[in-house]
Image (cartoon, grey):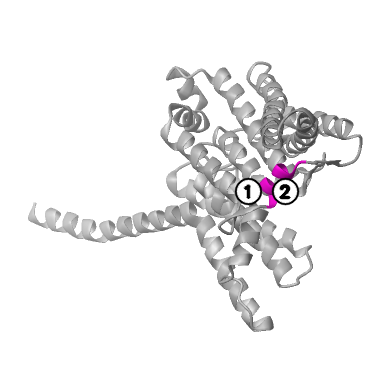
C-alpha cells in the first residue's frame, strides 16, 4: 500500500502542473479574446505614431485634432454597429442597415425642410430627426416579422430589405442628394462644445444608454440567452418572437439615428449614405469581441472595434497612403479577430467547425 501511495503521489505531481499550464493557457487566450479590440487599437496607435515621426517628424497620437477627426469618422458606423451588436449577440445578422440609414438621411432632410417653413428651426430639426428614426423603424419591423413569424433566415430577409430600402431611399431623394436649409441642423452636425463635436457628444450619450440596456436590463439578458441557446431560452419562458421583432426594430432605429446625424453633418440627405458603412459596422462588432455564433459581445467592445476601423481609415489618410490599403488593413484585422474568437471557443469547449 505504501508503494502504491508513493506511485499515486508521484503521478499526481506530474499531472497537476500540466493541468495548471492548460488552465493558464486557456485564461490567457480568453483574456486576449476579450480585449482584442483594445489591443488592436493600442498597436495601431503605436504604429501610426512611429510612422508619423519617421515620415515627417510629426505626431499622430498626441494631436487633439486627429482624435476629434477619428471620433467623427467613427460616429456613423458606430451607430449602425450598436444595433448590429444586439442582433449578432442574438445569433442573427442585419444586412439592411446601410440603406435604412440612407433612407433615414433622406427623410430627415425632407422633414426638416418642410417643418422649417412652419416651425422654429430648432423644433424643425428635432422633428426631422424624430420622424427619420421612426421611419427607419418600419423596415426594421418588417425584418422582425419576416424572421420571427415567417421563419425567413435573417441573412435572406434583411438582404431583401436592403434592396427595398435602397430603392425607396432613391425614389424619395429623386436620384440625387437632398440639401437641408436649417442652421441649427448644420450646427448639430458641425458645431462643437468646448472643442468636442456635438455629433460625438450625442453618440457618446447614446452609447452609454445602449450599454446600460444590454448589460443591466432584462431585455439585454434575454438577448444573451437567445444567442447562447434558443431552446433553453424558450424553455425559460422568453417570448422569442416578440424579442426578435423588437431587436430588428431597434437595429433599424439605430441606423435611422445614424442617417439623421449624417444629414446633419453634411447638411444633405443621401440615399447611399450608409452603403459603404454596412461592412464596417459588422467588422466593428466582430473586432469588438462579438461571436458570429451568438451569445457574446458588448457595446464597449463594439466602440473599440469602431475606433480601430476609424483609426485605420483616418491614419492612412493622415500619412498620405493610398486609400485602397484601408480595405486590406481592416480585412487583416477582421481575420485575426475571427481566428482569436475560434481559439477562444476551442478552449472554452464551444461548438467547432467541421475539420
Label 1: element kind: helix
Q: Are marks 1 and 2 in contact (CB under 8 Å)?
A: yes
Numbered range of the magenta stretch: 182-190
Which of 318/346 is in front?
Answer: 318
- Spatial CA span between label 1 and label 2: 8 Å
Find disc 2 in the rendering and name its residue. Answer: 265
**Quarter residue 161 falls in:** top right
For the point 90% across and 41% down, the residue is 176
Q: Is 188 covered by the magenta stretch?
A: yes
For the point 68% across and 16% down, the residue is 150
As displayed, is residue 71 above or below residue 66? above
- Give the main secondary structure, helix, strand or loop, of the magenta stretch: helix
Which of 47/265 is in front?
Answer: 265
Q: Is 310 covered by the magenta stretch?
A: no
For the point 52% across and 49% down, the residue is 301
Which of 234/347 is in front?
Answer: 234
Which of 348/188 is in front?
Answer: 188
**Quarter residue 37 falls in:** bottom right
Q: Is residue 57 left or right of residue 262?
A: left
Find disc 1 in the rendering and name its residue. Answer: 199
For mark 1, does the 10 Å Cα neighbourhood hold few (<14), some (14 to 19), or many (20 or more) residues? many
Amino acid at each position: 500500500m505504501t508503494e502504491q501511495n508513493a506511485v499515486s503521489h508521484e503521478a499526481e505531481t506530474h499531472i497537476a502542473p500540466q493541468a495548471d499550464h492548460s488552465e493558464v493557457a486557456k485564461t490567457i487566450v480568453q483574456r486576449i479574446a476579450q480585449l482584442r479590440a483594445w489591443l488592436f487599437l493600442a498597436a495601431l496607435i503605436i504604429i501610426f505614431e512611429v510612422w508619423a515621426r519617421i515620415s515627417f517628424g510629426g505626431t499622430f497620437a498626441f494631436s487633439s485634432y486627429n482624435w476629434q477627426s477619428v471620433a467623427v469618422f467613427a460616429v456613423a458606423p458606430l451607430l449602425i454597429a450598436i444595433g448590429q451588436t444586439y442582433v449578432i449577440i442574438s445569433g442573427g445578422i442585419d444586412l439592411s442597415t446601410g440603406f435604412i440609414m440612407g433612407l433615414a438621411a433622406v427623410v430627415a432632410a425632407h422633414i426638416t425642410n418642410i417643418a422649417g417653413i412652419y416651425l422654429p428651426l430648432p423644433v424643425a430639426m428635432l422633428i426631422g430627426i424624430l420622424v427619420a428614426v421612426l421611419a427607419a423603424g418600419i423596415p426594421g419591423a418588417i425584418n422582425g416579422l419576416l424572421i420571427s413569424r415567417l421563419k425567413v433566415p435573417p441573412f435572406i430577409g434583411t438582404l431583401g430589405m436592403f434592396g427595398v430600402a435602397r430603392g425607396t431611399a432613391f425614389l424619395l431623394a429623386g436620384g440625387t442628394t437632398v440639401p437641408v436649409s436649417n442652421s441649427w441642423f448644420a450646427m448639430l452636425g458641425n458645431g462643437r462644445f468646448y472643442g468636442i463635436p456635438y455629433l460625438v457628444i450625442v453618440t457618446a450619450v447614446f452609447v452609454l444608454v445602449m450599454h446600460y440596456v444590454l448589460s443591466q436590463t432584462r431585455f439585454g439578458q434575454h438577448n444573451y440567452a437567445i444567442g447562447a441557446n434558443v431552446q433553453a431560452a424558450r424553455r425559460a419562458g422568453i417570448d422569442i418572437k416578440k424579442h426578435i421583432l423588437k431587436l430588428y426594430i431597434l437595429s433599424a432605429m439605430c441606423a435611422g439615428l445614424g442617417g439623421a446625424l449624417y444629414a446633419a453633418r453634411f447638411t444633405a440627405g443621401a440615399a447611399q449614405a450608409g452603403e459603404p458603412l454596412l461592412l464596417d459596422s459588422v467588422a466593428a462588432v466582430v473586432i469588438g469581441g462579438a461571436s458570429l455564433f451568438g451569445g457574446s459581445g458588448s457595446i464597449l467592445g463594439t466602440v473599440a472595434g469602431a475606433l480601430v476601423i476609424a483609426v485605420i481609415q483616418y491614419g492612412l489618410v493622415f500619412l498620405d497612403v493610398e486609400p485602397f490599403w484601408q480595405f486590406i488593413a481592416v480585412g487583416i484585422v477582421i481575420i485575426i479577430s475571427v481566428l482569436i474568437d475560434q481559439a477562444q471557443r476551442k478552449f472554452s469547449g464551444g461548438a467547432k467547425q467541421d475539420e
